[in-house]
Image: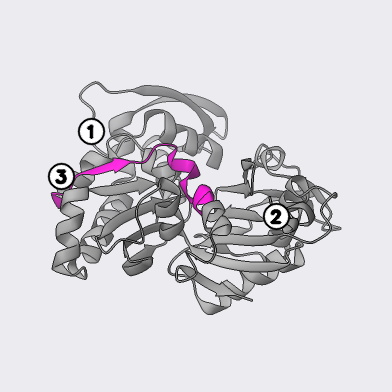
């Protein structure tokens, strides 16, 4: 352990639309919390951050607002994002350290300069000494343990709450990529719309996410799963329970799945033939929470002809990658997007 390890605690952050994960050097992933902040409307005072705030979504009285400060993988509410980051950094960085932490934050590969600036400023105002940005697909590949420094091509698909990141990686760089702002959140919205349209039932964000996780699938199931869901009848205005089956969820999220498959095909069309051949041999690696949707790898194989598999601990790969990049910043300096 070096001198700087005693006076500073360096941190890797997977700042996600749905969840934020924090990696601390020497400790691994120490925090996994929803990216939600509850504030008092009149004063702007923060009442809760993370899990406690998420439980308030759709349940708050008028004077309290539960806010998700990130939309589509980028900061939508600067002030609230800063409060979210400050809270999480304070939880993991102990006061015994003399210096502020260096932070590596993962960002979508399609991020704009303005959005980069928002992430950097938020992290600095939240207490970072130095801020490095790392593109999500590269962070995911590093976190999985793929040989990103080799000349052979690797395809990584990272699907979270706000974005789907599809990238071909070789020689410590992204050869080509597409970032589409269609992912788990849009699937949740489509499930809400499906129940409105077909059942006249209004459900909340948390319920639609539960449906997707418990009975959702990318392909129709021979043996259907079913679950009872509670919501508000749009005609009577009264609470009602109804049953929904997994193949209805397949139908509800079909548009999002088609758009993701199209994005994968578009990346292949721009990929040099030699690298495409490598990907056929190695297959597509899937990371992120939404990649865990039932039968997703099989849908990709059927539509593209290339086998796909979900990485172990898919939800943690990006956070782990930010941590590894942080520990070996010189090795991955070509992959780091920006430094201030």
Q: Residue at x 41, y 58 (%)?
A: 137
User: Which residue in the protein does label 3 denote?
Assistant: 302
Q: Quadrant of the C terminus?
A: bottom right
Q: Residue at x 39, y 46 (%)?
A: 287
Count residues near mark 2 (Cα–Cα under 10 Å), then give few for <14, some for 14-19, many for 20+: few
Type of colouring:
one colour
Tell me: residue 86, above or below residue 228: below
Query: Which dot, 2 or 1, sits closer to the camera?
Result: 2
Tell me: residue 308, above or below residue 162: above
Give the alpha-carbon distance from disc 2 to disc 1, as whole Å. Answer: 54 Å
- Which residues lie in the magenta part? 304-321
The question of residue 307 being in magenta is answered with yes
Count residues near mark 3 (Cα–Cα under 10 Å), then give few for <14, some for 14-19, many for 20+: few
SS of the residue at dot 3? helix
SS of the residue at dot 1? loop
Residue 98's image quarter?
Answer: bottom right
User: Which residue in the protein does label 2 denote?
Assistant: 2
| Rendered location of residue 10, percent (x, y) | 68, 56
């Amino acid at each position: 352990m070096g001198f700087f390890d005693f006076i500073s605690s360096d941190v890797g952050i997977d700042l996600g639309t749905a969840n934020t994960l924090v990696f601390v050097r020497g400790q691994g992933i120490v925090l996994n919390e929803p990216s939600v902040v509850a504030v008092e409307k009149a004063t702007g005072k923060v009442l809760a951050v993370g899990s406690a705030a998420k439980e308030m979504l759709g349940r708050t009285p008028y004077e309290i607002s539960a806010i998700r400060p990130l939309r589509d993988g980028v900061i939508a509410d600067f002030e609230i994002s800063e409060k979210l980051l400050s809270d999480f950094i304070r939880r993991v960085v102990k006061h015994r350290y003399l210096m502020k932490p260096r932070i590596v934050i993962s960002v979508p590969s399609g991020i704009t300069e303005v959005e980069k600036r928002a992430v950097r400023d938020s992290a600095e105002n939240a207490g970072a000494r130095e801020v490095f940005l790392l593109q999500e697909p590269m962070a995911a590949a590093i976190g999985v343990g793929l040989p990103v420094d080799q000349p052979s091509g690797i395809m990584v698909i990272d699907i979270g709450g706000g974005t789907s990141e599809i990238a071909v990686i070789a020689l410590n760089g992204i050869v080509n990529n597409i970032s589409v702002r269609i992912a788990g959140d849009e699937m949740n919205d489509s499930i809400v719309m499906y129940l409105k349209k077909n059942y006249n039932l209004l459900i909340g964000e948390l319920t639609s996410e539960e449906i997707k996780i418990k009975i959702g699938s990318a392909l129709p199931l021979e043996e259907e799963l079913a679950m009872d869901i509670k919501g508000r009848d749009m005609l009577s205005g009264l609470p009602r329970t109804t049953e929904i089956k997994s193949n209805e969820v397949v139908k509800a999220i079909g548009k999002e799945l088609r758009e993701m498959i199209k994005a994968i095909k578009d990346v292949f069309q721009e990929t040099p033939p030699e690298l495409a051949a490598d990907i056929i041999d190695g297959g597509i690696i899937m990371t992120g929470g939404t990649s865990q949707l039932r039968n997703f790898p099989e849908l990709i194989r059927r539509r593209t002809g290339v086998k796909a598999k979900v990485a172990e601990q898919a939800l943690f790969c990006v956070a782990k990658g930010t941590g590894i990049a942080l520990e070996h910043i010189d090795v991955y300096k070509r992959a780091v997007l920006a430094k201030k």
